[in-house]
Image (spheres, rainbow, N blue to C red):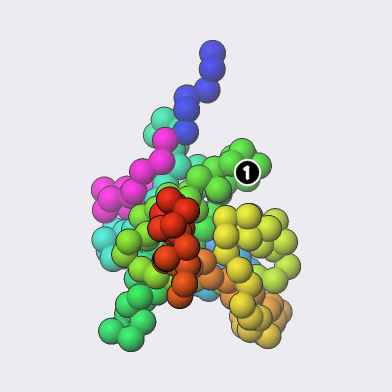
Amino acid sequence: MEPLPVQLRRLSPDDAELFREIRLEGLQRDPDAFSSTFEIESAQPLSYFADRIGRSAIFGAFRGSELLGVVGYAVQPGPKHAHKGLLWGMYVRSAARQTGIARKLIEAAIEHARGRIELLQLSVVSENMSARRLYASLGFEEYGVEKRGAKYRGQYHDDVLMAKKLVPGPGQEAASAQSGGDGR
């Protein structure tokens, strides 16, 4: 029997229990990949996760009812930063890695962000070369390194800062119109 196809969709507050489960798994298995910690989030009630889903666009990859991976997107707060968005909380369960799910999740977040923001940003721990390569293959560019950007259990990690422009830069709009492209 063939496995069920993977379906992508935006999570709703009704998915809070599934989101809590995969989020805590990610925090426990890959603690250095996240800004938060298992200790902090495991102490939160289910309503915390439902509220988080309500405040962000969180996309999930499902096979049947099983949540295989997630990624979050949020517009940055404040009028001077509302043109930028943040990609956060990327996690794919180990059994579903190397299947293209991470790429599909990020693509879904990019498409959702397009037309809403101009610049999509993320940070990734410098040692995570496979994630850095994936983000780069999707058009994210490294623009800086925050040395000792995170410290957990006495260990420092550098954060690589990456961004993807979602609108044409100066002069690209006219060139795109002449070539018939959409400028993206």
Question: How many discs appear?
Answer: 1
Q: Tag 1's secondary structure?
A: loop
- 109 over 127 or under it: above or below: above
Residue 122 image offset from top left, x and y in percent: 52, 69
Q: What residue is shown at x 65% (from left), y 42% (from top)?
A: 98
Residue 169 image offset from top left, x and y in percent: 47, 72
Other-residue count near label 1 (Cα within 10 Å), few / some / many at <14 / 14–19 / ≥20: few
Can residue 47 be seen in this snapshot?
no
Taking depth in this image into account, of 76 and 166 the one nearest to the observer is 166
Left or right: residue 154 compared with residue 181: right
- 161 over 135 or under it: above or below: below
Q: Quadrant of residue 95?
A: top right
Kind of residue at disc 1? Arg
Residue 17 image offset from top left, x and y in percent: 35, 50
Can residue 178 be seen in this snapshot?
yes
- 101 over 20 or under it: above or below: above
Question: Which residue is identified by label 1?
Answer: 97
Please check the rendered image and state whether residue 59 is part of the magenta-colored stretch, yes or no.
no
Q: What residue is shown at x 28% (from left), y 84% (from top)?
A: 79
Taking depth in this image into account, of 3 and 66 the one nearest to the observer is 3
Q: What residue is shown at x 61% (from left), y 38% (from top)?
A: 99
Q: Quadrant of the N terminus?
A: top right
Q: What residue is shown at x 52% (from left), y 58% (from top)?
A: 90
Q: Quadrant of residue 101?
A: top right
Start-end of magenta stretch: 7-19
Residue 132 image offset from top left, x and y in percent: 66, 62
Left or right: residue 92 compared with residue 158: left
Toward the front, the furthest residue is 178
